[in-house]
Amino acid sequence: MTIATSTIHLLSRGFLALTFITVRNTSCCAWLTQSSYPPRNLNKTRFHSQLLHSKLPKGQREVAFPNWDRGSLLRPKQKILVLGGSGFVGSRVCQVLLQKNIPFVATSTKGTYGTIKLDLTDESAGKKLVEICEIENVYAVVSAVGSIFSECDYEINSASGRVAQAAFESSNRSKSSAIPKFIFIGNSDRVRNVCKAIPQLKKYAKGKEESERLVCETFGKPTSSDGGYCILKPTFIYGGSSFNVNPPRLPNGIGGIIEALLGLYPIQALSDSLPDVLGVAFEAPVNVDAVARAIVNVATGLCECPSNKLESREDIIMAASLREGSMLKGPMPNGMNAR
């Protein structure tokens, strides 16, 4: 009896896998149909990498089921575009989108591993962005492009704003709405003020500031499910499994301990009372997975942000914690609303 039951169970799972295979990478799509996501015995980073980096045709890079529908949160067959999808934050955003079965496309500077090639520092990047949005039926654009401690920090960090502005103007000339919503990952004002005082980080800070300014000017209307913009302003983002100096990275273990310690109310109160240079040292970091989930919730319209900004770690964590069908009542921090 046990053998027969196991056989029927395996056959039924195999039938489901064959039913949902819609793209060329058969093994990756079969994994998506398993009851546990990702499989417990599979390395999550490798699993995500194999899905995101699959050599898929341009029209099938979303790696999603064809009949997927989230009702009022996303229009069927529309996609989210992740700029910098192979980077630290961008890859986590793609992973969350995969977990939620939300169609998306991703770009990277070199266009490797199945992403679309798009260099935001190129003069024609704005036009190319509009073309991608129109071809892929993009509903929201997430810019996770960034650079620190490089010679091109200003050019790279300011590119998101310049390209967004150029793309918006280009779509207006063609009377299309190619980019209805834009989400940008900036940094907190305190961090930026400190960076401006450090010679090696001045270009980084000015580039982020320029992008934020241009995004605000270009998409200067309240964020809603039908358009607008949102800027996330975290302090320090940690995550992953390894420590790194350039770019600076803290792994989950150490970062989680620091966040739990610095996130205590007495320490946060102390941080708020200190000048920027000293106060930043006591600011609690935020996990990259929380940042990614917050971005996805804003992009899909699950979290509305009339103030156009998530300005603190608490705002980001609150936005990340929302789930479809959340029954939250009353105003959220910074005027956020749950749908």
Image (cartoon, rainbow, N blue to C red):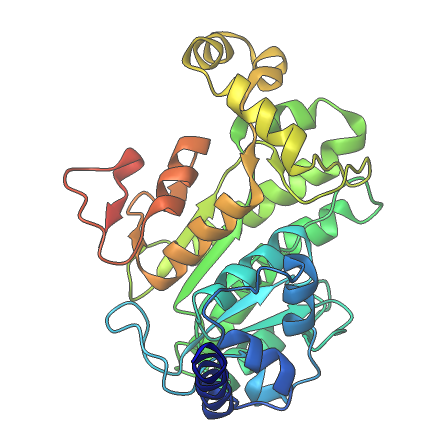
Q: Position of residue 324 (x, y in %)?
A: 28, 58
302 horizontally vs 88: left or right: left
22 horizontally vs 27: left or right: left
Q: Position of residue 157 (x, y in %)?
A: 67, 49
Quarter of the image holding residue 65?
Answer: bottom left
Along the line of sight, the residue nearer the viewer: 115 or 227 = 115
262 horizontally vs 224: left or right: right
Along the line of sight, the residue nearer the viewer: 145 or 62 = 62
Residue at the extreme front of the image, as rendered:
1
The reply to whether residue 312 is in sight is no
Residue at the extreme right of the image, as rendered:
151
Relative to residue 306, is residue 198 depicted above or below?
A: above
Q: Position of residue 192 (x, y in %)?
A: 61, 30
Quarter of the image holding residue 266?
Answer: top left
> Residue at the spot x=55%, y=64% of the render?
38
Point out the image quarter for the N terminus.
bottom left
The reply to whether residue 110 is in sight is yes
> Residue at the spot x=63%, y=14% of the render?
277
